[in-house]
Image (tube, grey):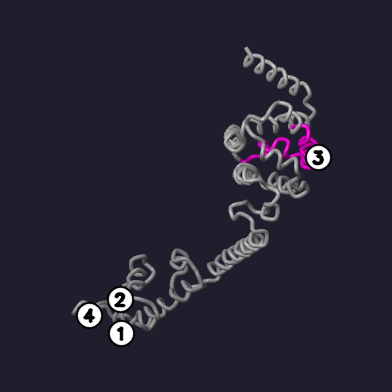
Amino acid sequence: MAWSTSELAELAGTTLKAVRHYHKVGLLEEPERKSNGYKQYQVSHLLRLLQITRLAELGVPLAQIAALGHADKDPDQAIHVLDAELEATIDRLQRIRGELALILRHRAPAELPTGFSNVAGELSEADRALVLIYSRLFDEATMADLQGMVQEQPRTDVDKEFDMLHADADRATRRKLGELLAPAMKAGLDKFPTLKSPIAQSPTRAGSARNAVEAAMHELYNIAQLEVLYRSHLISTGKAKELDVLEAALDALELDESD
């Protein structure tokens, strides 16, 4: 018994295009031809094609099918590899479904990194953008600490005042706001010490990570907010001398502007 290409494809439940592709990549041997040039497929070709289509249905890549040889070969190794890959894929998809459920439950922005959906409400628009950038620069441990700090420190009226701070806010306002923010910053850094120097834990080169953070900060916060954050950092880390240097620099700047 012999079959044409179309008959073989129909018997195997596949297409002419697929059969021709299997010939092209060397999975299916070319049969003998009749005197008129038509191919004559035998039972051995049908068995091989059925093996190929079955393994393809299971998700075995064509390259691995080629490595298996013909139907009399043992496919266990490829099946074990495929099973492990599918298990990893299922785990990944289950994690994604869990994250999507959190995003929907908290109505959080989908772009936030893993673990931040439940704290999205504690972040301003600028903070969310910065967290997204951090997620590409810092390691998982640092991001977990950042999430923990945000979760333990709900937004306050002081945070809202900071968000609304204008670039031309007076010095007294900037000084007061820096002092008000410092205790929460200190508490967070004391409990999550990796956040004191997150760039040290960055898988990205330190210089590149630092430049990216600085560029983002200057883009997302105005000059008054940046000063407040710097003041708060100096206070929370006990850097009184640096704070005096800042005050002296501002004194000199105000003096120059008054001349």
Cα distance in 3D space between marks 4 and 3:
85 Å
Cα distance in 3D space between marks 3 and 1:
81 Å
Quadrant for the N terminus in the image: bottom left
Query: Residue 106 at what x, y percent from top left?
Result: 67, 59
The image quarter containing residue 259 is top right
142 up-or-down from 86: above or below: above
State the residue in front, 200 or 103: 103
Marks 1,2: beta carbons within 8 A? yes
| Image mark for residue 34 | 4
User: At numbered mark 2, what does the secondary structure look like: helix, strand or loop?
Assistant: loop
Residue corresponding to mark 1: 2
User: At numbered mark 3, what does the secondary structure look like: helix, strand or loop?
Assistant: helix
State the residue in front, 246 or 54: 246
Residue 196 shown left or right of residue 91 in the figure? right
Q: What stretch of residues is rendered in magenta?
A: 178-203
Query: Dot 4: within a 10 Å radius of its alpha carbon, few (fewer than 14), some, or many (20 or more) residues?
Result: few
Query: Residue at position x 68%, y 18% from top?
Result: 249
Query: Residue 85 at what x, y percent from top left?
Result: 57, 64
Of tags 3 and 1, the one toward the viewer is 3
Residue corresponding to mark 3: 187
Cα distance in 3D space between marks 2 and 3:
77 Å
Kind of residue indicated by mark 4: Lys
Residue 126 shown in magenta: no
127 up-or-down from 23: above or below: above
